Amino acid sequence: MSTAFIECEHAAKWYGQIIAVNDVTLSVPGGVTGLLGPNGAGKSTLLKMMVGQLRPSKGVVKVLGSPIWGNPQTLRRIGYCPEHEGTYEDLTGLEMVTALTELHGFGHDDARARAEKMFGVVDLKDGMHRRLGEYSKGMRQRAKLAQAMAHDPEVVFLDEPLTGCDPLARVRILEVIADLAREGRCIVVSSHVLHEIETMTSQILLIHKGQLRAEGDVHQIRALIDAHPHKVRVECDKPRALAEKLVTQEHVVAVTVDGEAIVVDTRTPDRLYPVIPEAAKSAGVYIRALTSPDDNMAAVFKYLTETSS
Amino acid sequence: MIAMGEASRIYARMAWLRMRRGRVVWLAAALFALPLVYIAGLAIAGHWGRGLFDDVSELYFRFLLPFVPALTASATVAEEIENKTFTFVFARPAPRGALIIGKLWAATVPAIAVVVPSLALAWLVAQLRFPADMADTWPHLLRVELAAVAGLCAYGALATAIGTLFSRHPLVAVLVYLMLIEAGLGSSPIVLNLITVHWHLRNIAELPLPDTAFMAFSVPWWGSAIFAVGVTPLLVWLTTLGVNGAEYRTDR
């Protein structure tokens, strides 16, 4: 029996003339695997085929040894955290996660206990009785993570789980993902930000224009990316104060103030990221969001595409 | 896979919780309170008996029964698609049809719970001056009640089916259908009015039917009852078939 949790065999998905995923063959072992690619690369489409929400136009997508499309037995064993923000705004976080867990066959009380436990795991117990419509983006991401895990799945799919999260939420989500991997599960995390994936795993699948461009160790990609300037966008309440603190740091090439945010250019992002919270703390600045714009990732993919051709 | 009945119950509870906290349920309740005001007005104006009850029934069958389910059931599947929440529920080992049945249940059962006593109250008020006629007129009340229950189910299923097909603007699509087909064709003097729920409900409830000028058919009331009751599972089944094989995208 194969040790792979997920297998794609010449999987393709097209919508009319548009090819979203093109002849992808891959296998995913246990632990955390990063599905990396720029926006529009086909990551979400591939992920939706892996969770049985899209039927492959060609080829097969197997999860835990069985084709996933139209297969409720396998759906019972997977968890999915979608990328979008849409939730049941009129329900509380606890009500939504309880109901979704009940749909896995758990009784109401059991499902509620599991949901409460998961809200504890994602550090959202204080907010679980609030309506989802009142949640911040980071709280929504954590609630979505809770619904993906409450039924104790063997395989968890997380589509851009860190998008829009504040630094605290990011840290908590990263810890949860690391815990899931330690428990021997298979976790597939999609992201268009290399640094995000690097903090979770060194095992990556690189997708570009619907095709699998590379798979393996993230350090090889890191070597490529270091040759390019890296931009980090920090949204905060006092951008000028933070810019003053950061501009003196040795890892910073340039700092630009852009409205209520600053954009930091660096060639060593892995060294820069730990410096930002320290600088914010000493300047008394509140950070709302930390993102890496796509441009840099697009440049790496352009480089990869050029070298492969 | 979790059983259809159990999954439907979970979806129904979710839908009911959300409806209760939204505005639609209050709007629907206000609309259903309208006949009580209407009947009070007619009684004060001196209308009593079967005439009064039929006037109130007209308000139900022409307006409330088709349009309230349009408000509460048209977005059953459509809102899941437009808000992308289907990604949560379709990743579960539950039959997709349960989503339709559960939400339809949540929209229809409370409406039935309001309409049935409301019609009975209207009948009681109408008969207040003629208590001796009650024994003769209660079979008529039963037929009106049957037509109302079948109508709420059928219009709910119709709204769900049309709303699923036109998920961008479900309410508009359902209202257009109701205006053109149910209100327009159902009241027109041509034999095609037989395909409308509206015509059959009136036939069951002993309300005046439109004069059909060409190829008139006479349908017994129980024939209309079979049509009105049977159309609901048929529409639910067709909607489920459509949703079962469907792939919904989130990138539009």
Image (cartoon, rainbow, N blue to C red):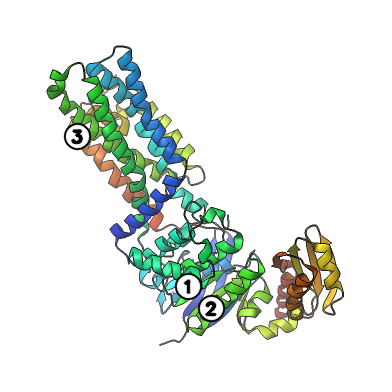
C-alpha separation, residue under disc 1 versus residue under disc 3: 50 Å
Label annotation for residue B181: none
Q: Along the horizontal axis of the image, is A199 left or right of B95? A: right
What chain does badge 3 belong to?
B
Q: Position of residue B66 (x, y in %)?
A: 37, 33
Q: Is residue B185 positioned above or below A32 on the image?
A: above
Q: Position of residue B135 (x, y in %)?
A: 12, 24
- Residue at position x 44%, y 76% in the image: A63
Could you tell me if the residues under marks 3 and 2 are in contact, i.e. CB atoms within 8 Å? Answer: no
* Residue placed under numbered mark 1 in the picture: A59
Q: Position of residue A72 (x, y in %)?
A: 37, 68
| Quarter of the figure with residue A272 | bottom right
* Residue placed under numbered mark 3 in the picture: B223
Amino acid under disc 1: Gly
Amino acid under disc 2: Thr
Q: Is residue B63 positioned above or below A254 on the image?
A: above
Residue A193 in view in this figure = yes
Mark 3 neighbour density, 10 Å: few (under 14) some (14–19) many (20 or more): some
Q: Quadrant of the C terminus of chain A?
A: bottom right
Label annotation for residue A25: 2
What chain does badge 1 belong to?
A
C-alpha separation, residue under disc 2 versus residue under disc 1: 9 Å
The local secondary structure at tag 1 comes to strand
Q: Is residue A216 positioned above or below A84 on the image?
A: below
Q: Quadrant of the N terminus of chain A?
A: bottom left
| Quarter of the figure with residue A46 | bottom right
The local secondary structure at tag 3 comes to helix
Label 1 or label 3, whichever lies nearer to me, is: 3
